[in-house]
Amino acid sequence: MQIIYAAPFVLLSMIAFGVFLVVPRLRRHSISALVAPVAFGFCALAGYISWVLICGFVLKIALRPVEGVHGFFEVLFFFLLPGFAGAWLAVWLSETALRKWGDKSVWKR
């Protein structure tokens, strides 16, 4: 199950990394392109699982099926929002680390 969920994100990150590495103007963003899709997938899943566990064990709320307006907002706030926040944080951390410790001549070519 986890492999089926993670495979598209890993494939997308590898394709984006390759494209960004080939295009000279985008080369400096290639590490971010490698990190962002995988971080989005992990953080989105972690956010939704956290929501389900909080509803079940803390709030004692029975979750309804994800459909209609309720499902739209549930997916928006508890899947997409943590995913985008996690991807943004991972890109920021990778750019900061690359700026601090990376060899700048490799990524400027």
Image: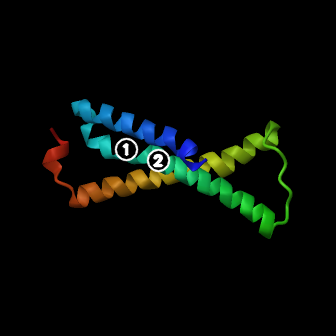
- Closer to the camera in the image, 39 or 95: 39
- Closer to the camera in the image, 96 or 21: 21
- Closer to the camera in the image, 101 or 9: 9
Task: Determine the residue located farthest toward the bottom in the rendered image.
Answer: 58
Disc 1 and disc 2 in contact, CB within 8 angstroms: yes
Determine the CA span between mark 1 and mark 2: 8 Å
Q: Secondary structure at mark 2?
A: helix
Percent coordinates x, y for residue 26 in the rendering:
28, 35
Label drawn at residue 34: 1
Percent coordinates x, y for residue 63 in the rendering:
83, 53
- Closer to the camera in the image, 84 or 22: 22
Q: Secondary structure at mark 1?
A: helix
Q: Residue placed at 37% from the left, 38% from the top? A: 14
Q: With 13 as the anchor, is 83 left or right in this view?
A: right
Q: Residue placed at 86% from the left, 57% from the top? A: 62
Q: Residue placed at 61% from the left, 45% from the top? A: 80
Q: Is residue 2 above or below residue 18?
A: below
Label drawn at residue 38: 2
**Quarter of the image containing the C terminus?**
top left
